[in-house]
Image (cartoon, helix red, strand yellow):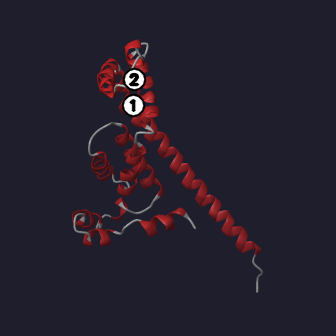
Amino acid sequence: MPASRIARRWLPTPDRLAETKGLRWLGHYLQPRPWLWVAHRRRVALGVAVGLAVGVIPLPLQMALAAVCALALRCNVAAAVAATWLTNPFTMFPIWGLALWLGSLVIGNGGVTAEPAVLALQWTAPATWWPAFKVWALDMGPALLVGLPLSGLVIGALAYVLIYVGWWWVIRFERRRRLRLRAARPRS
């Protein structure tokens, strides 16, 4: 079953959103603007890119900000909101590593290193973890502040290209498969 059929089956329609108590405003807004909700290759790819670019920056209400940005850029709102879920405690460290590396490249300093005070955490005393983390975070502050938006742009751009090309490839594969099936069918 193609991914677009699966997405259509699981995603709520604007009519259903208009009937939901807390999301009534969103359903009324999306009903006359179907391009913000329809699974279209360019709009979904852009929605994921926007969601990842916003989701990388550690802000409260990432999903709401991603939805507002998706509305402003006229891309798929559901894809933008769902893409913010990429950032979680498991993916935070690779994303922050990329952000620190990009920030160090742009700022020009040698990068952030873990000082012996941070590495010598007292693992048996959790009360010491926060002060050590705070010292380390303040040391990496400028590189992280510059690198997080850059990493969001890089990850968003890569996601856009991957989704756009991947979707194109799936469409092409499905068309060729249908043509082969049609050609193999006996003519009556």
Residue 96: image quadrant is: top left
**Rendered residue at 68%/65% (across/down):** 177
Residue 88: x %, y % from top left: 40, 42
Q: Residues within 10 Å of mark 2 (few under 14, many from 20)?
A: many
Q: Quadrant of the C terminus?
A: bottom right
Amino acid type assigned to the residue bearing label 1 in the image:
Leu
Residue 68: x %, y % from top left: 27, 50
Which mark identifies residue 103? 2
**Rendered residue at 35%/52% (across/down):** 81
Is any part of residue 11 visible from this angle? yes
In this rendering, the answer to whether 84 lies above or below 16 is above
Query: Mark 1 falls on what kind of element?
Result: helix
Give the spatial CA distance, label 2 vs label 1. Answer: 8 Å
Amino acid type assigned to the residue bearing label 2 in the image:
Gly
**Left or right position of 21 against 143:** left
The number of discs equals 2
Label 1: which residue? 150
Q: Residues within 10 Å of mark 1 (few under 14, many from 20)?
A: many
Residue 139: x %, y % from top left: 33, 17
Of marks 2 and 1, which one's residue comes earlier in the chain?
A: 2
Residue 118: image quadrant is: top left
Residue 50: x %, y % from top left: 38, 45
**Left or right position of 110 against 61:** right
Q: Disc 2 vs disc 1: Cβ atoms closer than 8 Å?
A: yes
- Work out whether residue 166 or residue 42 is closer to the camera in this orientation and state it: 166
